Amino acid sequence: MSLESRIINSLKTLLDPLSHQDIVTGGVLQGLQVTEWGNVSFILDINTQYMNEGIKLKEKAETLVSKIPGVKDVKVILTAQRKAPAPRSLKKEVPGIKHIVVLASGKGGVGKSTTAVNLACALHKMGLSVGILDCDVYGPSLPRLLGVNEKPTSDDGKIINPLEAYGLKCMSMGFMMDEKAPAIWRGPMVQSAVQQMLHQVKWGALDFLIVDLPPGTGDVQLTLAQSVLLSGAIIVSTPQDLALIDARKALEMFVKVDVPILGLVENMSFFLCPHCSGRSEIFEHGGVHRQALSLNLPLLAEIPLHMSIRETSEKGTPLVYSMPTSGEALLYGKLAKHVLSILYK
Ligand SMILES: Nc1ncnc2c1ncn2[C@@H]1O[C@H](COP(=O)(O)OP(=O)(O)OP(=O)(O)O)[C@@H](O)[C@H]1O
Ligand SMILES: [Mg+2]
């Protein structure tokens, strides 16, 4: 039996003070990580009303796990963030849209928006009708990535007509805001902006709506995950440890609110030199693969760090369209196929 299984079995003997279920089944145990050297870390997410019992539980768990042969070091983090998941019935479908897929990450700047746009383009090239929604109210990127920035029109003053670029229907808060105005958003404003972009935009019939999220686990993510029926979330991460730790937090948030995780994407996976096509593993490529394996989730794609990806993004000409035969465009095509194979299996 693996060390991880032995740890889980031993933690199963501890009970959650609130539900009296064992802490593994009750979801109190989260983010268990076991290195090959026996360094163990995990989170115990308990209810705030039971903080004192939580501290005792943490001590018991530490003692228990540290006695397991093969364990060298144990780190336990106590959190009290657990919220009851929204009942499924409260989650609404958006009429006409078959699949809503969100791209999320824990850390900023890992390439969510770049991946979202190229994935949307790749799905559209396969003959599907696709929309893309930029829900990053704090720093919208769709206007730049698709080279569109007009004020959307409305026929009746209520329903907004999405813009169109590269065959994609697109909507972004960036189309509605003054680029120079600082985006100061409070929770309820975010909630209503997100609802409006989903329900008051004339999306029409779509096979896919790809949603680009801000980094982290804030109001936008929670509003979407709790109010709309999402087909799934794709977690984008770079291979560095810190990005991976944050990616895991994002992933756990979606799991808590019953959103299926479709898989992980490793972006900036390795460096491809534009001159000699030589490959350098600058960020210790493979971290996301290991994370995916340990979580039993698919690794959907490994996208290299490549100048052409950044340049085409900056020009507003997505790589999948402007360099369709490049190796990178083919990788986004494979990502699209992978997503389809999961949702239409
Ligand atoms: N695979 C890649 N190769 C080269 N450059 C990339 C790659 N992926 C993203 N970039 C560049 O990295 C920067 C950040 O990418 P992007 O805006 O997509 O990240 P993000 O996760 O959406 O960021 P934020 O958290 O701010 O929304 C951009 O300049 C983008 O062009
Ligand atoms: Mg972004």
Image (cartoon, helix red, strand yellow):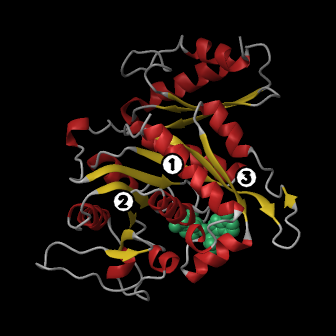
Between 235 and 163, which is closer to the camera in this rendering?
163
Q: Earlier in the sequence, mark 3 or mark 2?
A: 2
Q: Earlier in the sequence, mark 1 or mark 3?
A: 1
* Numbered mark located on residue 129 in the image: 2
Between 238 and 166, which is closer to the camera in this rendering?
166
What is the crowding at mark 2: few (fewer than 14 residues within 10 Å), some, or many (at least 20)?
Answer: many
Q: Which residue is denoted by mark 1 in the rendering?
A: 234
Query: Which of the 4 image quadrants contains residue 128?
Result: bottom left
Please name the residue shown 56% across and 61% down the image. 115
Residue 164 to residue 32: above or below: below
Answer whether residue 342 is visible to the viewer in this image: yes
Task: Check if mark 1's residue and mark 2's residue have beta carbons within 8 Å.
Answer: no
Residue 287 to residue 134: above or below: above
Please name the residue shown 64% across and 57% down the image. 330
Residue type indicated by callout 1: Ile
Residue type indicated by callout 3: Gln
Q: Position of residue 64 (x, y in %)?
A: 65, 15
Q: Position of residue 279 (x, y in %)?
A: 85, 59
Between 312 and 106, which is closer to the camera in this rendering?
312
Q: Earlier in the sequence, mark 1 or mark 2?
A: 2
Query: Which of the 4 image quadrants contains residue 202?
Result: bottom left
Left or right, residue 283 beside residue 45: right
Q: CA distance from mark 1 to mark 3?
A: 18 Å
Q: Which residue is denoted by mark 3 in the rendering?
A: 240
Q: Position of residue 13 (x, y in %)?
A: 54, 10
Residue 95 to residue 124: above or below: above
Mark toward the viewer: 1 or 2:
2
Task: Check if mark 3's residue and mark 2's residue have beta carbons within 8 Å.
Answer: no
Left or right, residue 7 beside residue 121: right
Report whether the residue tagged 3 is closer than 8 Å to ligand 1: no
Residue type indicated by callout 2: Ser
